[in-house]
Image: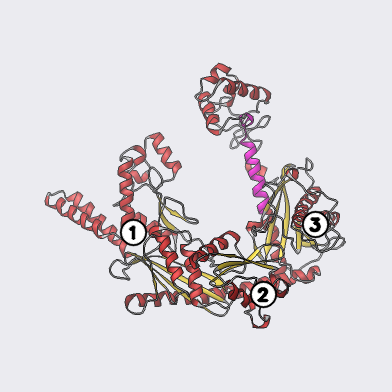
Amino acid sequence: MADPSSYRPRPGEIPDSPGVYRFRDEHRRVIYVGKAKSLRQRLANYFQDLAGLHPRTRSMVTTAASVEWTVVSTEVEALQLEYSWIKEFDPRFNVKYRDDKSYPYLAVTMNEEYPRVQVMRGHKKKGVRYFGPYAHAWAIRDTVDLMLRVFPVRTCSAGVFKNAARTGRPCLLGYIGKCSAPCVERISAEDHRELAEEFCDFMAGRTGTYLRRLERQMAEAAEEMEYERAARLRDDIGALKKAMEKNAVVLADATDADLIAVAEDELEAAVQIFHVRGGRVRGQRGWVTDKVEEITTGALVEHALQQLYGEETGDAVPREVLVPALPDPVEPVQEWLTGRRGSNVSLRVPQRGDKKALMETVQRNAQQALVLHKTKRASDLTTRSRALEEISDALGLDSAPLRIECYDISHLQGDDVVASMVVFEDGLARKSEYRRFQIKGFAGQDDVRSMHEVITRRFRRYLAEKERTGEWTDGDEPGAAAAPETAAAGLAEPPANTLTEDDGRPKRFAYPPQLVVVDGGAPQVAAAQRALDELGIDDIAVCGLAKRLEEVWLPGDDDPVVLPRTSEGLYLLQRIRDEAHRFAITYQRAKRAKRFRSSPLDDVPGLGETRKQALIKHFGSLKRLRSATIEQICDVPGIGRKTAETIVAALAQAVPGGPAVNTATGEIMDDTEEPGQQTGSPGEPVSTGAPDERRGQER
């Protein structure tokens, strides 16, 4: 725990101007980002008596080891820079609205030649029109199913679309009239795009034009006694009205607005947002956050606005934003929103009428979300805390292991040997910290030796990062005799960059765990402990969890530690071990699949995927390509004589593959391969047994 006075800036050193500041911890990670109208006045609040600070503010300033700031000219610039740094550094103490789900949107891919209507989650893509968010994906599909009667826009995937174009037959939706079938040119690309634009207009709230047009066409069809067409138009009108009824009118005059409500207590806050477009509620979402310091409702609203509109532009930012309290000052935030939209945005608190009534509904939703979150979290926090305390007591640790790393080895009969490292912090998986290794120090199957190699490589990288950043606490540098690994490390990802003054993002191997768990018994534990001893690391605990009896093994002990079957600590260790096993075997299977899909053509320099496919398509199989002459290969479009000579040389060096085996019947397939068939790598059959038999031998 650091003393804030140890890094407090000297009097007069902090400028009295707008700016953004960053607190960093001892590892140079950015842990908090804030902005201020006056940096001097704002930062002075953090260096007062600790007893007078908010509990989480006190935790933040005692975790920090330094503070730095950047001066800007205006408060709008400070707002923009604060948002950028929060997105870049992901500080642990900042107000970050999190939810346990990714909200689905109704998306229209206007960036494609033939726009497609589909459900999308996650980050928004450029050139795609989004509507929502919706609470459930099935609600989107119900709406789309009704809309396709009138706007038969493409909904199929790229693979289905290409297959239909190749065969000349549309999918089922094309036959039943719910797709205009641009894949078989029933409609031109221009007409299909116009249809997609009409679909977007209707979803954006401009419904009256289309309903009136359909009613006029229905009346004309009835006058001309085209009763079947009139009946179809009548059903189309009914479908559109049914789709509209799913979102009742809540605000008159086709209002476009977002309503934001906040429910809070001393430690947490819940935010609910209703998206109203064309006077109807088109989407709803909500978040819950921890309150790191004493923060007003207006400041919470400001953070919510940053989260909502930080990456939005144009019509995605509505003309009107209704909030329970205004940020202080409100002018920079309103100017920032106007800049994001490109036209004036009204940010205000509703005082009366329909908007105030709807705001009360949003407020009730926020209050219910906070109550539900607290009910879930109280149980979750209690369970996780108890589990960590049980592990600490069972292993004789000085404190609860807040960061746990678990390692597992996976292979298939000694081939494709890989390892995984998973990280749990505060009892929760931290997937951004997961790492994968390829075992390259030796060949064959040896779990103990593999574990020693992985632990050595991981903590050599930790020591190397520590040495680069000057974090040694005494004169004796542990592991100084061991040279840091470079490109020969065999990591599945490139080495981490050096931590610098301007870089506070988490690094791959920069932070040590309090506990290392290995999947295995006494031999694997001994190998892990030996690796740490060789590096001179003595402040990290090691244990192993054996699968057979779920026993916990400690280094040097002849007998295991047996935790009760009902122990929360044992359950947490099992979850961590199972996650490490899942991550390792997923990587191992991916490597094996890539190896089976490999081809001698992969080794030909300058031969890309397009020309490889052209070769296989031209000759029909790799076997026929082997027997082709240089002149015959030159006949393939895009293949010159020099490339053809290189291909012939590469295929001559490669050993022909064994016969392909039908895994369903066991029979040897004919030597003639189907056009475009994937071939195995040299000297390997396509398959040597049923998939289940091979999978059962994986470790």
Residue that extends furthest to the front in the rendered view of this protein: 12
Q: Of the residues under marks 3 and 2, which one precedes in the sequence? A: 2
Spatial CA distance of label 3 from label 1 is: 61 Å
Q: Nearer the viewer, residue 89 or 288?
A: 89
Q: Dot 1 corresponds to which residue?
A: 204
Q: Is residue 598 magenta?
A: yes
Residue occupying the point 54% across, 26% down: 615
Pointer 3 local density, CA inside 10 Å: few below 14, some 14–19, many at least 20: many
Work out whether residue 292 can be spotted: no
Pointer 2 local density, CA inside 10 Å: few below 14, some 14–19, many at least 20: few
Q: Dot 3 corresponds to which residue?
A: 521
Q: Is residue 70 left or right of residue 351?
A: right
Amino acid type of the residue that numbered disc 3 sits on in the rendered structure: Gly
Query: Image quadrant of residue 670?
Result: top right
Q: Which mark is residue 11?
A: 2
Q: Quadrant of the N terminus?
A: bottom right
Tell me whether circle 3 and circle 1 mark residues in contact (CB < 8 Å). no
Stretch in magenta: 582-604
Q: Of the residues under marks 2 and 1, which one precedes in the sequence? A: 2
Q: Of the residues under marks 3 and 1, which one precedes in the sequence? A: 1
Query: Image quadrant of residue 364?
Result: bottom left
Spatial CA distance of label 2 from label 1 is: 56 Å
Q: Is residue 180 left or right of residue 492?
A: left
Amino acid type of the residue that numbered disc 1 sits on in the rendered structure: Ala
Work out whether residue 482 can be spotted: yes
